[in-house]
Amino acid sequence: MWIHKLRTMLLPGMAVISLLGLSACATHSNPVYLEQSQPQSLRVIGLPLVEDNKRLDVRRENPVYAIIGISAKAVQQVAREIHRIKYQDANPALHQYCVKTMRQGIKKRLRKLGYRVVDLNMTYWQAQKAFRKKDKRMEGMDALLRVHIKRFGYFSASPYKPYRPGMVVTADLLSMQNRKLLSSNVYNVGYDRKDISNFEFEVSYMTHIHVADKRYFYRDFKTLMRHAKASSKGLKFVAGVAAESVAGDLRKRSRRYTVASN
């Protein structure tokens, strides 16, 4: 069964990789902090559907393949897809559950911060189009919060490092009136910061959030699969932290954080 899935998913995935390689450019060059000098101007936030590729990612990189060449990279890509499919088959509802609870977490946190959140059953681009057409669903909305999951799953940077759960997600808050970017950030939640490349995700920076829990570290794929059900708790936890991070950045405050150093 997984072989059929591999055939239908691998080629489109490789095409996407090729396109990214040709057109990669940084869309997030610097974090944008929410300006709170006029907090009354931002009251109603629309939350479109979370953007993602609708599948968990399970991968282990091998730097040796990069040296050998394209044929070795293709072998690595095949192995990656096989592992991803096997893990997702062991947890068929996990991805959907995590994205759903993440979205709920964002809404709950924003409402606690004093915002009114409009739950939109449409994509960010559909919401923009609806606003231009004066759709009643968009009435009174001050901004849209666009959330895009770039990667979510278990990742190992080399055969000598364990698989660990994590997520890379971008969040952009844009004004409905003039499309001004009010707030923007890129979050690496859980992955080892030394193992994540900005270039791969087409960003110029990342805010790294350390949530490592060695209970959810697995030395190899066989170990991960033996604990497939238990490992789902690691991804659920990461999704919860991501929701808190995205919404928490929009809290009303008089000034930015002061970064302390030793």
Image: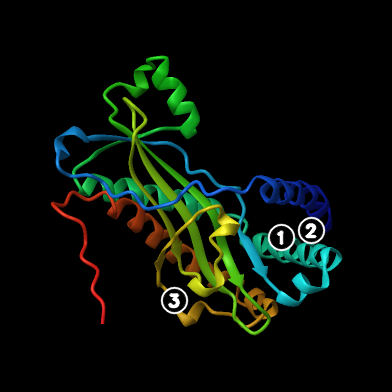
Q: Secondary structure at mark 1?
A: helix
* Picture disc at residue 49: none
Report the colour scheme: rainbow
Q: Name the residue type under label 1.
A: Ile
Across and down, in percent, residue 177 comes to: 31, 25
Q: Residue at label 1? A: 85
- Seen from this angle, which residue lies furthest top? 133
Q: Residues within 10 Å of mark 1 (few under 14, many from 20)?
A: many
- Residue for point 29% across, 53% down: 249
Q: Residue at label 3? A: 212
Q: Secondary structure at mark 2?
A: helix
- Residue for point 16% across, 54% down: 255
Across and down, in percent, residue 141 comes to: 29, 28
Q: Total number of numbered labels?
A: 3
The first of marks 2 and 3 along the sequence is 2
Q: Is residue 247 above or below residue 116?
A: below
- Left or right: 7 in relation to 225: right
Mark 1–mark 2 Cα distance, whole angstroms, equals: 6 Å
Badges 1 and 2: C-beta atoms under 8 Å apart? yes
Q: Quadrant of the C terminus?
A: bottom left
Q: Is residue 108 above or below residue 154?
A: above
- Residue for point 71% across, 60% down: 85
Q: Residue at label 2? A: 2
Q: Name the residue type under label 3.
A: Ala
The first of marks 3 and 1 along the sequence is 1
Q: Quadrant of the N terminus?
A: bottom right
